[in-house]
Amino acid sequence: MKIEDVIKLYDQYILPTYNRSPLCMVKGKGSKVWDLEGKEYLDFFPGWAVSGLGHCHPSVVSAIKNQARKLLHVSNNFYNVKQAQLAQKIVERSFPGRVFFCNSGAEAIEGAIKFVRKYGSLTGRYEIITMEGAFHGRTLAALTATGQEKYLKGFEPLPEGFRKVPFNNFEAVKKAAGPKTIAVLMELIQGEGGINVADPEFVRNVRALCDEKKMLLIVDEVQTGMGRTGNWFVYQHYGIEPDLMVLAKSLGSGVPIGALIATRNIKEEVLVPGTHASTYGGNPLVAAAALAVFKTIEKERLLQQAQQLGAYLKTKLMELKEKYSFIKEVRGIGLMMGMELDRAGADIVTRARIKGLLINCTQDRVLRIMPAMTVTKRQLDQGIAILDQVLKEALAT
Ligand SMILES: *Cc1c(COP(=O)(O)O)cnc(C)c1O
């Protein structure tokens, strides 16, 4: 099959909800992917931040193979070993809590919203404070929490009970926190929002306010979690602990899995049998894959790698900033970097792709560079060299 044939099938049979590049990927290994025509690409945005260990990491592949031979799926009316072990692993690497498994980021956010609402119903509170520039997914409630106009238009009426405030503005959070407020929901690095990093003081103040007013702090770690910032979870850079944490994307490094972790401090039994469910949630296949992700990060010391290579990447991007005046800012933590331009970045993404480098652009002007944690220094150099060329071309036109 040729790319033209694939595109024809898409045009006829797939709902057109995405902007797609005219590329059809057929194979991946680490930070490299190959398209239908056999062209090789260096992937600095693998799987939209899903493939944290790179494409087809051998440990993940063999965990999937082994589990697939034994048992793919059982319902949550039974116990399964892998789910138990994975939950234990997540809690041991984060905070004392308990886990609910589902299939995606939006679904995990939805679970968190339901959880805090149920908890709030004990005291008549339901309102959730969210941040401008956030992204929490596309289901109706997650979308409302996301609150970006371009995603909301045409989907009204939306669920009630969300209050949006400017990011990194503690006074605004304080003002919005009323007698009906039960939780604050935020990313500590807004990914889709443009790699906006939360101020440490803001985060500490919000945590203290939540304690004072007995509100729950929900941290969305769907994009930041699982090591790419150099810690397991980005909140660990801030010296705080959330009450709820939401995971997905690179948790399974390629298999669809989401998770919600809720602190044990919530004493009341909020989610009792029957109050929430997800058919596939934490089935043996995806749980085995996610367990392999944890083990690989530990065995290959990928947190240290993300710190070191992240620092290296930042230095290199800062050098580009010195060179090209249209780069306004370089920001991020570890291997989660953004480069804000004074102009649209789509053309740069396209030019980079043609030269064999895959990156992303978000919020029109922010180039998003999130290589796999298994990327090598040499690959970073290769990628930066391509980016340098492309930026030079952009300057000339
Ligand atoms: C991608 C993303 C989501 C939504 O995840 P899906 O799996 O696409 O539903 C939620 N929050 C953040 C921070 C994300 O980056």
Image (cartoon, rainbow, N blue to C red):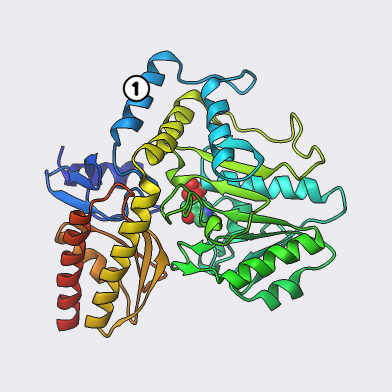
Tell me if residue 337 comes above or below residue 297 in the rendering. below
Looking at the picture, tell me which residue is in the foreground, 183 or 306: 306
Q: Which residue is mark 1?
A: 65
Note whether residue 369 is visible. no
Mark 1: few/some/many CA within 10 Å (<14, 14-19, 20+): some
* Quadrant (top left/top right/bottom left/bottom right) for the N terminus: top left
* Quadrant (top left/top right/bottom left/bottom right) for the C terminus: bottom left
Q: Residue furthest left?
A: 38
* Residue at image coords 18%, 55%: 378
Number of numbered labels in the structure image = 1
Q: Name which residue type carries label 1.
A: Lys
Q: Residue furthest right?
A: 123
Q: Name the image quarter holding residue 167.
A: bottom right
Residue 371 located left or right of residue 182: left
> Is the CB of the residue bearing disc 1 within 8 angstroms of ligand 1?
no
Residue 5 spot, x, y in % from top left: 19, 42
Looking at the picture, tell me which residue is in the foreground, 356 or 288: 288
Tell me if residue 394 comes above or below residue 359 in the rendering. below
Residue 367 spot, x, y in % from top left: 33, 68
Residue 340 located left or right of residue 322: right
Query: Under tag 1, what secondary structure?
Result: helix
Residue 64 spot, x, y in % from top left: 37, 26
* Residue at image coords 58%, 21%: 75
Looking at the picture, tell me which residue is in the foreground, 105 or 70: 70
Residue 182 located left or right of residue 256: right
Residue 84 spot, x, y in % from top left: 58, 26
Q: Residue furthest top?
A: 70
Note whether residue 356 is visible. yes
